[in-house]
Image (cartoon, rainbow, N blue to C red):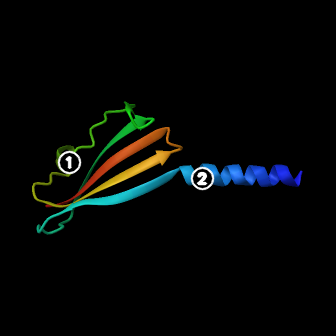
């Protein structure tokens, strides 16, 4: 019974380690950060097949918040077991 519990705990830890979110800076300009933040996201199956509108472009993120002067651009990737992957572009500026 103890081996079963230890095995289940190991599997649970492995599954938890496979689901992760990373945020990476992509660009910084000399413009002021400002108060506006725009986001654009797309969800993919196995990282390649679009499940939703897969437009996480910089221009879409800017349009969502009315940003005309970009200060920073970040990319957020959330992966659930490598099966469902969500990519998000985050833009700040004025």
Q: Which of marks 1 and 2 is nearer the N terminus?
A: 2
> x, y percentage for residue 89?
28, 50
Task: Tell me residue 3's x, y (percent).
Answer: 84, 52
Say which quarter of the image contains residue 41.
Answer: top left
Mark 1 lies on residue: 58
Tell me which corner region of the image, top left, top right, bottom left or bottom right, holds residue 46.
Answer: top left
| Number of marks | 2
Depth check: 91 or 77 in front? 77
Numbered tag placed on residue 10 in the rendering: none
Query: At 39% across and 50% down in the image, what residue appears?
Result: 77
Q: Classify mark 2: residues with Cα within 10 Å, few (<14), some (14-19) or many (20+).
A: few
Q: Is mark 1 on a helix, strand or loop?
A: helix
Residue at 61% across, 49% down: 15
Q: Name the residue under label 2.
A: 16
Query: Dot 1: few (<14), some (14–19), or many (≥20) neighbours within 10 Å?
Result: some
| Quadrant position of the C terminus in the picture | bottom left
Whether residue 37 is situated above or below residue 4 in the rendered picture: below
Quadrant of res 23: bottom left
User: Regarding mark 2 in the picture, which secondary structure is present there?
Assistant: helix
């Amino acid at each position: 019974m103890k081996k079963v519990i230890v095995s289940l705990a190991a599997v649970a830890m492995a599954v938890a380690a496979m689901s992760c979110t990373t945020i990476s800076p992509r660009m910084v300009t000399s413009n002021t950060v400002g108060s506006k933040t725009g986001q654009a996201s797309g969800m993919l199956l196995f990282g390649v097949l679009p499940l939703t509108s897969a437009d996480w472009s910089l221009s879409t993120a800017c349009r969502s918040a009315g940003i005309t002067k970009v200060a920073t651009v970040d990319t957020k990737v959330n992966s659930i077991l490598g099966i469902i992957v969500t990519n998000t572009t985050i833009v700040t500026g004025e």
